[in-house]
Amino acid sequence: MNAKVTPIRSAAEMALIERFPALKASLPGHAAGRAAAHARFAAAGLPTRRVEAWKYTDLRAAMREAAPLAAKPNEAETVVALKGPSPFAGIGAVTLSFVNGHHVGTDGAVPAGVTIISLAEALTAGHPLLAKLGTLALAQSDLALSLNTAFMTDGAIIHVADGAEIDPPLMLRFVTSGASPVATAARSLLVVGTGAKITLVESHEGGGALAHQPNTALEIIAGDGAVVQHVRLGLESAAAVALSTVTADLGAGTSLTSVNVALSGAVVRHQVFARFSGADARAQINGATLLKGSQHADSTLVVEHAAEPGGESRELFRTIVDDQASGVFQGKIIVQPHAQKTDGRMASNAVLLSEDAAMYNKPELEIFADDVACAHGATCGALDDELLFYLMSRGIAKPEAESLMIESFVGEAIDFIENEPVRSVLHGLVQQWLAARAASKSAGV
């Protein structure tokens, strides 16, 4: 006789399970997938290390309480949240601003060839592009994305017309603010037409030390021959438990570059699910993560080659880990049987700056075709002593010498960004992080 096993739910899990029935009537629109997504979460709960995809990030332990879902801010709260300048203020982007997951305004004229509507408006109106939301099967079982789907409140629906070349960039600025921790569930969709070109920048900000719980998702659907540059910056509050997901469905001859830079947050997980649905697509998926204190950051990606010829994928992740921080890289390339001529290469490189720092790497290949060129690799080590000695012998103090080496190491992941102003902003933020580290080391902190 088999006894029925009833899992013991944590306080956060119970709050999230009970919250949906209480809130679903007040959530915008009638998104058909909400209930199914919440049911998936309710059955599984918050992922722990027993879930293979979350082997090194125990979200159940990290999220002991579920912060309340943030309400739409009033005008005064919006002014306070946006009073500080955006890190990307100087790039000339058309900017959609979101406070606590809700759209609060757009700065700049939307270029010809682009149509933008807020997710809340789209859900309320039953916009036709909603049919493309959540269609990537590769990501549908993910628990973080299921939570986002259940509680999604706002975001941006962006459509780029066939052949349009959009300049300047579009930016989605997300700011989490308030006197107490809140949870957010922003969801955005970027549909890029045949032969179109666009640069999309995301900035996720949450100054202070409140334990906010942002859970954001961006879906990219790129038509044949489209060129998409995507940049994401994570500057969440110091105590935040932050989840982010990017999905990408690539048509034939598409080119995608996606770069994630993570500089803050207590527990951060950024995940990418990309499918090569059309032949000869190309993708460059990068990450640059700098960790200190007791931070924990997880970069997880799954790339599926599902067309013939299978196209080319490149993944380059650079991680700096200082103090007692810990980093994670999990990457998987899947080559389906018919995806011959696939060229996939994945690399994770980490530098540990202290004896207490930790890095976990798990690169994987699942290859079901026989005419492919695929490889993966992972390295983990300290800074080169000989090069460090050379710099110090030229009169450069050790903290500054380390900074030069780190900036060069991390910069390789950032330099794939074509837009020079965006690239310069990210290099500047890395330099600020390194300057703060050098100052603290010089002071003996």
Image: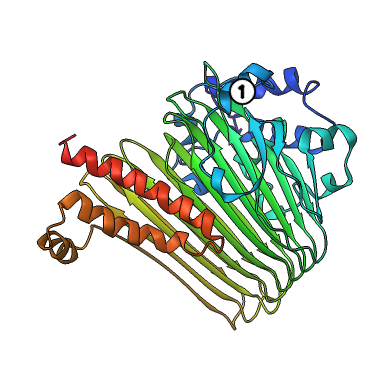
The single residue placed furthest to the bottom in the displayed view is 371
Above or below: residue 69 compared with residue 285 = above
Viewport quadrant of the C terminus: top left
Question: x%, y% of residue 131?
Answer: 84, 47
At 63% across and 23% down in the image, what residue appears? 78
At 66% across and 61% down in the image, what residue appears? 228
Above or below: residue 313 compared with residue 39 = below
Above or below: residue 108 compared with residue 266 = below
Taking the image as shown, residue 323 lies to the left or right of residue 364, namely: left
* Residue 423, visible in the rendered structure: yes
At 71% across and 23% down in the image, what residue appears? 20
Question: x%, y% of residue 60?
Answer: 49, 31
Taking the image as shown, residue 224 lies to the left or right of residue 269, namely: right
* Helix, strand or loop status at disc 1: helix
Taking the image as shown, residue 389 lies to the left or right of residue 166, namely: left
Q: Which residue is at the front of the view, 155 or 104?
A: 104
Q: For the residue carrying disc 1, how many other residues have a C-alpha within 10 Å: few (<14), some (14-19), or many (20+)?
A: few
Q: Which residue is at the front of the view, 10 or 2?
A: 10
Viewport quadrant of the N terminus: top right
Taking the image as shown, residue 28 lies to the left or right of residue 416, namely: right
Q: Name the residue that disc number 1 marks.
A: 79
* Residue 141, visible in the rendered structure: no
The single residue placed furthest to the left in the displayed view is 393
Question: x%, y% of residue 440?
Answer: 22, 37
Above or below: residue 161 compared with residue 156 = below
Q: Look at label 1 and name its amino acid.
A: Val
Question: x%, y% of residue 305?
Answer: 64, 69
Q: Count all numbered tags in the image, as a single digit.
A: 1
